[in-house]
Image: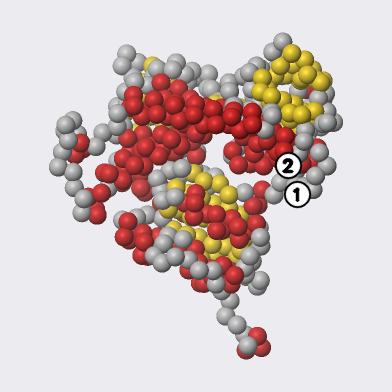
Amino acid sequence: MTRIVIIGGGPGGYESALVAAQLGARVTVVEQDGPGGACVLTDCVPSKTLIATSVRKQALLDASMLGVHFTGGPDGEVGGVIADMPLVNSRVKDLAQAQSADIAARLAAEGVEVIRAAGRLVDPQVVRAGDRTIRADVVIVATGATPRILPSAEPDGERILTWRQMYDLEELPEHLIVVGSGVTGAEFAGAYRSLGSEVTLVSSRDRMMPNEDADASEVLEEVYRRRGMNVMGRSRAESVKRTADGVVVTLEDGRTAEGTHCLMTVGMIPNTSGIGLEEAGVTLDRGGFIQVDKVSRTSAPGVYAAGDCTGVLMLASVAAMQGRIAVWHALGEAVQPLRLATVAANIFTDPEIAAVGVTQKAIEAGEIVANVVKLPLATNARAKMQGFNDGFVKLFCRPNTGIILGGVVVAPRASELILAVSVAVQQRLTVDQLAHTFAVYPSLSGSITEAARRLMQPMTPSGI
């Protein structure tokens, strides 16, 4: 029986453990924080729970556009719609623990051993887990990553915070300054604005989320500004200091921004230091990320890696797939290498932004030849009914064959809508095939099939 030891219990760890157990391996997961790791306990699950609450509150605030009015409530604020932050944060933490417990139960049901301890490599076939030493045929490293800390903005857990500390606040921040306008910064900034905080978003670039679709970023920034957020573009933070009753953020050009709290969202660093990787022959890049190939192998024989510690794409879905691929490859199963071109990603803002496949940027740079169509969500009947005016569906295809190369969706629940485009990219479907697929009317997904119809090539006389 093959012995597999997995260091890390996040998506890259527990998903690989489940596959390995189902294939008959003897599996041990070493995780010091609990099943699900940081993804479930402090990062993805808690943040998306908070965001779900903020989206619900924003929907109540926007209800007047549909003819639903609040005449006031016992608290007399915004028609009685307020966020009870102790209750919100308690629910966030409870839900994370419940999800971790569900994962623990699933691992136990599959016969996976879980050791609550820190793990480290002694050599490529030996793992130290607390006071235990375990010999393994295969080791998978899935240790994740940690919020990056700037020396000039040390978190104190009270006024200057990482996102992992936000759920310990007893009150809603009166004025939250978010430093960093990438995905995490944009998500938290939008959530706290909808919950009722005054929010200032400090962005070092000329637009929010500079690595995402430019049209999508433009829509979201317009929505945020309309909701009263102060978005400071081209404003790189130099330092964050605590004051008597808040914080002051000093920018490189000398300007300052003052608030009651500051959330730092300036990237992640891999959890790869001090766990014996380099001593065991595992190569790290200059950023400390584990270098892996497309089947998750590291430079050390029998050692694989998955998830944020590899820096491939910091998504839970990618971590899980890397872990599964590692197991399939290690156990000699049929396996397809990781294809980043088929990865669907979502930004849980309001509206959400989802994308898969090629990008508009690559097309405009001439790297890829593609036809493009973009349909505004405001023309969709279901969107009109629900009062959704912001967003669009964008689809890319090859000019001659019509093979779908990717797409972008900006809409409520874009994370669900992108699946149709993701399937099309994965299975190399054409716009004709997607256009001939039934969509419910009225539905937001109808915009996807409509986009495909607009990309269909007219038949030439010889093709009749």
Mark sitting on residue 325: 2
Residue occupying image coordinates x 44% and y 50% = 413
- Residue 444: x and y in percent read 42, 60
Quarter of the picture holding the C terminus: bottom right
Using the image as rendered, state which of residue 114 and residue 330 is in the foreground: 114
Identify the secondary structure beneath mark 2: helix
Q: Amino acid at mark 2?
A: Ile
The part of the image, by quadrant, that contains residue 365 is: bottom right
The three-letter code of the residue at mark 1 reads Gln
Q: Position of residue 218 (x, y in %)?
A: 43, 50
Q: Secondary structure at mark 1?
A: loop
- Most foreground residue, 28 or 245: 28
Q: Are marks 1 and 2 in contact (CB under 8 Å)?
A: yes
Residue 52, relative to residue 254: is it above or below? below
Cα–Cα gap, marks 1 and 2: 8 Å
Q: Position of residue 256 (x, y in %)?
A: 37, 27
Residue behind mark 1 = 336
What percent of the width, then of the height, locates residue 160?
A: 42, 20
Answer left or right for 10 relative to 239: right
> Which residue appears at 77% of the width and 36% of the height?
24
- Report which quarter residue 363 is drawn in: bottom right
Q: Residue at x 69, y 49 (%)?
A: 339
Q: Quadrant of the N terminus?
A: top right
Judged from this view, the residue extending furthest toward the left is 71
Q: Which numbered circle lies on residue 29?
A: none
Residue 332, compared with residue 418, is above or below; it is: above
Residue at the extreme top of the image, as rendered = 131
